[in-house]
Structure formats: C-alpha cells, structure tokens
Amino acid sequence: MILPECPSTNTLAAELSQAGQAPEGTVVITHNQTSGRGQRGNTWESGKGLNLTFSSVLHPGFLTASRQFQLNKVIALAVHDVVKKYTPEQVRVKWPNDIMVGNKKVCGILIENQVTGEKLSRSIAGIGLNVNQSEFSSPLASSVSIHSGKAIDLVTMFEDLLQSIEWRYLQLKNKQADKLDGDYLDSMFRINETHKFIVGDKETDAMIVNVDSSGKLIMKINNEMRSFDLKEIKYVY
Ligand code: BTN
C-alpha cells in the first residue's frame, strides 16, 4: 500500500493487521510520514519525498517470544546489506538495530511484536532510511546519498530492500539462525574495541563482545562480563 501521506506506517500497518487486512508480506509505505515513531518513545523525522519510510507485516509464528531479537537481526542485516552497496565507507549495525555509516546514523528500525501464547503471532517491522536528505537537525544523523555522493533512485532502493528483507527472513525461517548470528556479530558497530559508554549515569570504558539470545548487549567492563538492555546503556561519541 502506497500513501502520499500518513502519520505512521507502523501504526497504519498494525491497524490493517488488526482488521484482518494485512496478510504476511504486506508493506505500507508513504512519501510523507507526519508523526513517525522511534525507539524509546522518540519521534522519527523524515523530509517529504526524500527518504524511505515503510513497514512490513510479518507472521513469524515459528519463533518463540524469547527469540524475538532474531527479527531485529533479520531487518538490521537486510538494510545493512543494501546500504553497503551504495558507499565505500564502513556500514555497521549499532546495537540493537541502527544502521551507521561511519559514525553517523542513516537508518532507524522500530519492530513491534505481538505475542500469542509462547509464539510471535505478528511483527510490524518499521524502517526509516535516510536516502536523499542532505540536512539534519542532529549532527549524528546522515543519509546514504551524503556518503555515496549522488542522488539515489528511491524505487530501486526500496525494491532492493524488500528482496533483502525476504532473503534474511527466509534464512531465519529455514533454520539458518547461526548464519544470522555470525553476520550480525561481524557487522556490529564498535565490537571488540574499547570505547566510552554511559553505564547507569557514569562514563565508563567498555568493550562490546557479544549479544545474548534475548538480545541483551554483553560488554566487558574491568575484566567482568555484564549484560545490558537498551535503557541501561548509552554510546558516547
Ligand atoms: C529509531 O528510533 O531509530 C527507530 C525509527 C523508526 C522509524 C520508522 S519510519 C517507518 C516506521 N513508521 C514509524 O512510525 N516508525 C518507523
């Protein structure tokens, strides 16, 4: 479904799904998202007609709720694989699922899951990829075209992304999760390097070493392994 304007493709996809009108594979995309939602209750701003803002509806009934982080890997790697084709710079997945080119964020992902019993009955994977926007209010944000040096055809990139999502999703469905796990670790931003992070309210030197099966970030701090969820840790640039 293509809409000239819409408040949030994630919200609309969830409403369609609730109404029984969004079989698996349904994609909602808009040229102008006016109230985009981000992680931790943040908003997601995107210039009209410049970027890709869309949501895919998945029915991962084969996945238990305890393994839901696998979907973050599927979507983040799918976007990572496509963005890599557009720039010689280093493309990385910043845990849990931001896509970075160098030290700048070019894409945010919001995955909203519905659990029925022990299984995931529905997942809305929302992707906000900055493609042709050239100015941002945040100094940490960027777009793919800034790093590729030329304007990008949105339709071509969108089609590439849908194929990439399908490919990574089938990897998960076809029991190749170990491949996803390996690729996710290989593409992780700042893995196996010591950097400053805010842990609690203190700035601390720490090293990302892994992600556990529930999606928690495993870090080595003062020779001790500790795991963190999204609210407990902040990257320092
Ligand atoms: C983040 O905070 O980094 C996640 C941003 C996710 C934005 C996308 S844009 C398409 C979809 N619809 C929304 O309202 N949010 C997601």
Image (cartoon, helix red, strand yellow):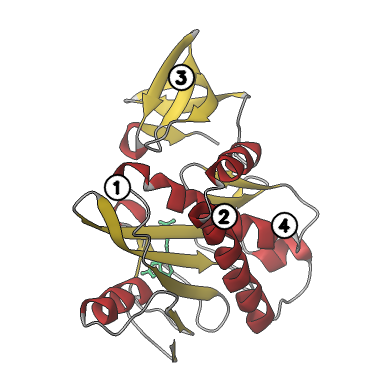
Q: Which mark is residue 65?
A: 1
The correct choice, above or below, for 216 with respect to 161 in the image is above
Q: Quadrant of residue 166?
A: bottom right
Would you name the residue on which mark 4 appears?
A: 84
Q: Position of residue 104 (x, y in %)?
A: 60, 50
Mark 1 → mark 3, Cα distance in angstroms: 32 Å
Q: Residue at x 60, y 76 (%)?
A: 158
Q: Which one is earlier in the sequence, the residue at label 1 or at label 3?
A: 1
The correct choice, above or below, for 84 with respect to 202 in the image is below
Mark 3 → mark 4, Cα distance in angstroms: 31 Å
Disc 1 element: helix
Would you name the residue on which mark 2 appears?
A: 171
Task: Tell me the amino acid under the disc marked 3.
Answer: Thr
Q: Quadrant of the C terminus?
A: top right
Q: Position of residue 178 (x, y in %)?
A: 57, 40
* Disc 3 and disc 2 in contact, CB within 8 angstroms: no
Task: Tell me the amino acid under the disc marked 4.
Answer: Lys
Disc 4 element: helix
Residue 213 in sight in this render: yes
Q: Which mark is residue 204?
A: 3
Disc 3 element: strand
